[in-house]
Structures are given as structure tokens and as C-alpha cells.
Image (cartoon, rainbow, N blue to C red):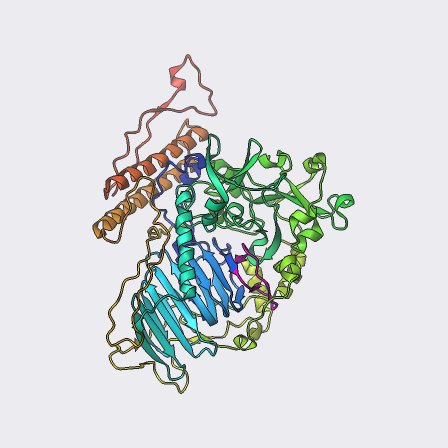
Amino acid sequence: MLTVTVPASRSLFIALVGGLFLATGCSSMAQVAQPPVRTVAAAPGGDPPGRVGRLSLLTGTVSFRASGDTAWAVAIPNRPVTTGDALWSDNGSRAEVEICSADLRIGAQTELDVERLDDQSIQASLPQGSAIVHLRALATGETDEIDAPNAAVGFGTEGEYRVDVTPDGATTTITVFSGAAEVTAAGASFTVDANQVATVQGDSAATYNLSNIGAPDDLDQWSQSRDAQETAADVSSANYVSPYMPGTTDLAANGQWSQDPTEGPIWYPHTVVAGWAPYRDGHWVWVGRWGWTWVDDAPWGWAPVHYGRWANVRGRWGWCPGRVIAPPVYAPALVVFVGGNGWNVSLFGGGGGVGWFPLAPREVYRPPYATSTGYLRRVNITNVTNVTNITNVTNVTNVTNVTNVTYRNRSVANAVTTVSQGTFVNGSPVSRGIVRVPPDEITRAPLLRRSPVVPTRMSLVGEAANGRRAALPPVALQRRQVVAVHAPPPAPVPFSVQQRALATTGGEPLTHAQVVQLRRALPAATTAAVRVRPATVLMPGGAPLRPARAGIPAARPAISAQALRPPTTMSEPVPPRQPPTAVKREPAPLPATPTRAPAPVAQPASRVQRLPPGAPPITAAAPAAKATRAKLDDAYVKQSTQMETRHAQEFAKPPSGESQQALAEQQDADHRDLQARYQQAAAAGKSTLPPPPKAPARVTTSKATPPKATTPAAHPVQKRKAPVQKP
């Protein structure tokens, strides 16, 4: 089984929910440093994950199986990949899944089953084929793991790794281009260093061998070329988007960045058809916990449809990514729906129609699925600058009523896309099924938090994927057992069972608790974990793992892994993530003569290390600089935590005589000052932050008592304490 546990801090999002909402909008994004962000895990079980995978590249014939379904369909680019999904790449085919700061690439004749993808880990099975995993950043304490039929491979550092499983499942080869791997099989473990290859053969009497890495094959070279393309593309967007936002590497080749005086940094696609609007060229699919999800046809159609907002600037649509102050949270589609059951049946036919338009900058996204207050804040933090807007949403009991909100893009000519419910539910191409609705009908149409359409099995992959014959993996792979260090979650609840429950909710996505309840009502065999047995124990009657030849260090007794730790609470700080570092291939000596002759290995390209604008780069040859930056990051996190605590207290009980608007402006200034001081210290190579400027006396005005120009006492002067520096 393939298990890739990705760091929580790569996709678990900040608990800084006070003043961060007040930071300047995207207009200041390129000018403000990008210091470390204190990140925490999401609420256990209740909220959906903050990240998913993206089918970023498909070559040849690749098939996809949706979570809870049993049928394979043709894979479609830009499809989200999450828990329960599976991929099969046929002869001469390849695929790439992009997951935040990791890439997972598979070669021909490979099956990859994603058993877990959430805010703590990625877990998948690899019963056959080849997979390359490129980890560009790891959090402190992070443990990543790949599990194959007879070996589990753990990663302790960022790097580039490859796992190959033979068609019969009897041999697993682990290649470490850079980094380090810990292999566990038949109750024992051994280490594979950079530039080494390990081979595990057999199962009940497994042996292992070590050799030097050989010359790169076609799959290696393809993966390296992908790295090089991403590195080049990252440079143009590095100052505008978070390093943890997937899909940004496609922006450079398909559009250009500009600076708008109102919206700030904004990205415009190069080529669109006349009358185009966002969320128009593509189709809708149903994805478990998130519900209706947009799949865009454009090669750049990932980041601009799952993050940020869209603005119509002088008749031209541009994407505003938001502030680079936190890892972004994935959303299925940042739109507002209009219409509803029975809307305008005369135009759309039976069932009526459904429409949508994109959210504009600073407008609050109201998820169509149940979430906690913390999640609602995190999913909006990079794009909503006014704390009042989010507070008004999170402080009310019922947030489904969106009719009292004035949305900017609703009134933009041709911004609302409308189709029949049949086109919507079948995942048909939207551009082919658009129904023109008179503007006055659009104005009168009710606003909806979610589409009221109940999904069908066709909705899982869409019309285009269902309409073509998919390549199927060998039947033997369905029965092939895999080994793991961490046990995977139960199998997904069949969609046929979920569909009956969805009919009672009117198409509202099921909550985690509802899915658990459905699982309990099913036979145990239906929801048992995937075909997995522990790699840390011997098979009954089996022999311990042993070296295949003399001179190789003996394997150590395996240690059973603890269960995945529960998510941390919202108040618990998590160490800041270090920026992605370049991957280097460095030779490692072997204890004995290798079985494969060493060969030169091409230096793989790696994504650029993203640092705050103006901060000097940190290289592997400068450990002192790394230590200095780590101290500076710690100082920033401490001051930021203190500031956020104070901001939250101030909003709960504003200083006497200070309006909310004035308080928001002051807290916004606090954020700008802290980030500017971080940038100044980073550029100078300092380990501590400069002291904050002395807070000047401020004039505050009470909302209840209007100021009187002739009465000085009506203008109370209040000094605000400067934040205390604790480097």
C-alpha cells in the first residue's frame, strides 16, 4: 500500500482569526513580506480537509474511479483527488497529482488508490507500477510513508523518491534520489540514503539489497522535466500567491499579472472567447464532503476557481488571489448560486434552472456544506479584509440566508451563467448548455447558498468521462494485499447508500457524523479497511527480513507506529513551516560492492525556494544563516501570537471611545508594521525583530457621542500600548 503522510502545517490553517482578517487586501500583497504563519489542525472529523489533490497532468490513457463508486471512468484534467479516489494509468501513460508542496507522479501500468487525504496525511495503495514522490517541504515532526505490497517506506526529510512494484507484487524497489528513507518489511526496518536503491524481494521470507542509483530512465527524466517547468513558472507568481497554493505553475504560460489600483495584483488569462465569464467553460461533479464541485476545462483552471476571487475591471475578468498571509483553504467553487427548484420552468424545462456567478474580492464565501466557525474564517481569511463581514456570518445561527447581501458581480453584464438542472446534474459541458435568461429575470432570481440539485451516479465524474470507455486495471489487483505502518481508514460508504440520504437533504452534502451513521448501518465487510496488513509484524510462519548479501547492515526490529495523532486544538501553536528547499542528489557510500554499477545522475530541477520579498536566500551551504532565520521566525511567531491575542480581546471589548472602523485600521497598521519589521530583519540577516515604533497618541471618536468641535473633552485621547517584543 502507498501511504504518503503530508505535513499538517502544509494544509492546516491558521488560528490567527483576529487581526489577520484586517490585514490589507490583495493590493498590498506584493509589497508585504511573507513571514512564517502559525498553523494548526482543523477540528477533528467535522470540517472537510483544507486541501485536496489535483489531476494536473494526464498523458495517454488514464482512468479514474470516484470515491464510493465501483466503475472506472476516463480521467479528466483538473479533477479533484481525495479520499477514496483511485487512478489507473494504462500502457504508455502517465499522470501527475499535485498536492500543495508535493507532487505524486505515476508511470505506465500503475494503480494508485487514495485511501486517506486530509489535513494530517495522504494515504494510498500502490499494488502495481511506479510512483515518484517529490516532497519539497516537511514540517517539524512530520512522518511521510509509502506502502507497497511487501514493504512500507518512510521519509524523514524532504526530497525525491520513487517506488516500483513488479506486476506480480513480489518485488518492491525504492529509489532515493535525495533525502532519506526508512523501509519496513516483515517486522524489521533498514535505512536507504540519498543516491541509493533498495530492493525488497519476497514476502514470507523477504530479503533486501542495497546498490547505487543507476542512470535515469524515461519516467525519471519526465519527472525532472516537470520539475524544471514548475521551477520556471513559479518565478513569475512567487510574489503574488502562497507557495502552498496548487495550480499556480500554470498561470505564467496562460496569462499575465498586472497591478490594479483598487484590486492590487490581478491575473488576466491570455485568451478567452467573447462573452466569457469565470466558471463557464467546464462542468459540475459531485465530490463527497464538498458537494457540487467545479471542474474547469482551461489548463490554468485550478487555482483561479478554487481560491481567490474574480473582479471585472473595465470590462475584463481578472483573478485576485488574495493576501499571502496564510496557507489557502481549498473550496469546491467560489460562487453564489441563483434560481432553485422550479425556477423559470418555461425557459429551462422540467425541474427549472440553476445559475451562478463568481464572488468578488472581499466578499465572504459561505460554504454549501456544514463547517465550524473556525473553518469559515480560515477559508475566507486570505480574501476578506473586514473582520465585521466574517463576524456577521460566524456570529449568527443561520448563515443560509444570502438574500440580504449585495454581490458585486451579480450586476456585471453576462456574469451569471444559467443552465437547466439536467445539464447541471449530469455534469454536461456548461458552455454547450447555457440558457440565456433576460437580465430582469436574473435580478429577480433568488440567491442560494448551495445548488438544490440532488446528485446521481453520473454526477460523480460527469458526462464526458462517462461517455467514453475507460481502460481497466488487471482483475488480480483487486485482490492484492498491501502492507502498511499506519492503518488506513474504513472504505468509503457506497455512493448508492449516500444517494438515498442526499435525497432527504435536498442535495446538501452529508456531514461527517451522517457518514459515520450510514457506515454503522452497513455490514462490516462493506466498510472494512482496504486489503492491508501491518508491515511491522511477521506473517504467520514467516521469516524475519534479512540482507540478501554479506556486507549490508542488519535490519533493526520494527517499531509499530502509533495511531495518527488527533488534530491539535485551535489554541495550540504548530512550528512554522520552512520554505521549500532545492532538491540535491548527493552520493552516499555503500557498505559493500553494489550489485548495479553506479552511473551519473542528472541533477533534477526543483522548485525555487520561496522567501519573503527582499529577504536573502538561504542555501544548504549556510547553516548559520538557517539558524538565524529560524530564530527570526520564532520571534515573529511569538510577537504575532501576542498581537492576535490582544486584537481578539480588543474586538470583544473595544477601547473606550474607539469606533470599530478606527480599531480595524489600527490593527491593520499593526500587521503591516510587524511584517515590515520581519522583512527588514530578514534582509539584514538578523535573528531578532527591530523594536516596534513608539505608538503615537491617537484621537478616537465614540460612536454613541458625536464629537463637538468646541468641546475638547468630547475628543478623548487614548494611548495604545505598543506590542511587547519577546525575541
Residue at 30 percent across and 58 percent down: it is 584
Please state the horizontal and vertical placement of residue 420, each as a whole percent of the image: 71, 49
**Left or right of 527 in this view: 635:** left
Residue at 45 percent across and 29 percent down: it is 661
Q: Quadrant of the C terminus?
A: top left
Tell which residue pokes out farthest to the left in this image: 624
Nearest the viewer among 713 and 666 is 666
Nearest the viewer among 26 and 236 is 236
Is the stretch drawn in magenta largely helix, strand or loop? loop
**Left or right of 16 in this view: 467:** right
Residue 78 is inside the magenta segment: yes
Examine the rendered structure and indicate whether residue 125 appears above or below residue 22: below
Examine the rendered structure and indicate whether residue 537 appears above or below residue 294: below
Residue 496 is inside the magenta segment: no
Residue at 56 percent across and 54 percent down: it is 290
Examine the rendered structure and indicate whether residue 645 appears above or below residue 597: above
Q: Quadrant of residue 656?
A: top left
* Residues rendered magenta in the picture: 59-82
Numbered circles on residues, count: 0
Do we see residue 143 in this rendering?
A: no
Q: Quadrant of the N terminus?
A: bottom left
Please state the horizontal and vertical placement of residue 600, each as a whole percent of the image: 30, 65
Residue at 44 percent across and 39 percent down: it is 21
Tell which residue pokes out farthest to the bottom in this image: 541
Q: Quadrant of residue 9?
A: bottom left
Nearest the viewer among 231 and 263 is 231
Please state the horizontal and vertical placement of residue 513, each as a whole percent of the image: 55, 60
Do we see residue 620 in this rendering?
A: yes
Please state the horizontal and vertical placement of residue 572, each as a whole percent of the image: 37, 52
